Amino acid sequence: MTDANSNISASKPEPYSLSVVGIGRTGAGYVDGLLRTGEIEDVLMDPRARVAALVIDVGDRDLQRVDGYAAGLKQRLEEQGVAPENFHYQSISLDMPERDELIASLDNMADGKSWLPKDIKLPEAGSHLSRAVAKAIYYKAYNDEPRILDVALTNFANHAEQSELPARIMVCFNLAGGTGSGMAIDLTRQLSSDKLTKKIPVIGVGQLPHSGDGDAPASLFASLNELDAMTKGNDKQDNPFTGGFFVVNTEHSWQRLTS
């Protein structure tokens, strides 16, 4: 006689750990959504799970809400008896450096061949960045003392690898945004190739702009071309998104909200 529950148990998803990196305003939105709606909380009900969340932006304007949700989640986890060390959260607000300081940092890393022009005008922290400026700020924060992003990625990877369950990592950003698209590829490459010692799938989540954002910026096409080239690679340096890449189209949601 066939067990009536055999098909149900066979299709039940296996428990897993989920960690996430959010870059820029859009990336921060994905992280605060996970913290706010309970997915991370559900994962951590299994004592074998470990969850790490890292949010990075230039300026802190878009970090305040996700910081609040993280604090609330930590309180709920404590009330439910979840060990505090099972959840690791860090948000990093990068300062906008002085132009000469940024150029000098790049010159040191690129043998005097900075990709930014010497007379570039840098925007204020919290305003829109070009991909080139965002990439430069990322490399400065990763390589210059106190190497804040190098340390943050190391701590993030170490925590994710402590999971006793199968783990996966998401890297979320806006494909058209300067901060996200400028930093995400290099960050993911260093995470996959240098920081992770276990075979944890790293999944890219790139959000497309919708019609409410206006005309698609050139940064979108640069991001898509870069991703297209990466998918033809066979190793982590060529394609650091070892778990695949999801392109998120938000046009339908935008139309529903504005109809």
Image: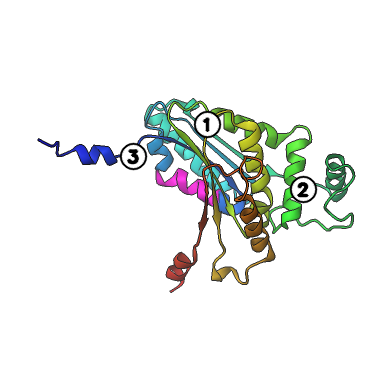
Which corner quadrant holds the C terminus?
bottom left
Q: Is residue 86 above or below residue 240?
A: above
In the image, which disc is placed on residue 136? 2
Which corner quadrant holds the N terminus?
top left
Q: Is residue 17 above or below residue 32?
A: above
Which percent across, then down, holds residue 173?
58, 52
Residue 215, image quadrant: bottom right
Few, some or many C-alpha atoms within 10 Å of disc 1 (few <14, some 14-19, many ≥20)? many
In the image, which disc is placed on residue 160? 1
Q: Is residue 72 above or below residue 253?
A: above
Which percent across, then down, holds residue 94?
70, 44
The residue singled out by tag 3 in the image is 13
Classify residue 119 as left or right of residue 181: right
Which percent across, then down, holds residue 233?
63, 47
Residue stretch in magenta: 28-38
Q: Please, what secondary structure does the residue beneath circle 3 have?
A: loop
Asked whether 233 or 101 is in front, the reply is: 233
What secondary structure is the stretch in magenta mostly built from?
helix
Asked whether 142 or 88 is in front, the reply is: 142
Few, some or many C-alpha atoms within 10 Å of disc 2 (few <14, some 14-19, many ≥20)? many
Is 54 a magenta residue?
A: no
The single residue placed furthest to the left in the displayed view is 1
Is 30 a magenta residue?
A: yes
Q: Residue at x 64, y 35 (%)?
A: 193
- Colouring scheme, one of rainbow, by chain, secondary structure, one colour: rainbow
Residue 148, image quadrant: top right
Q: Please, what secondary structure does the residue beneath circle 1 have?
A: helix
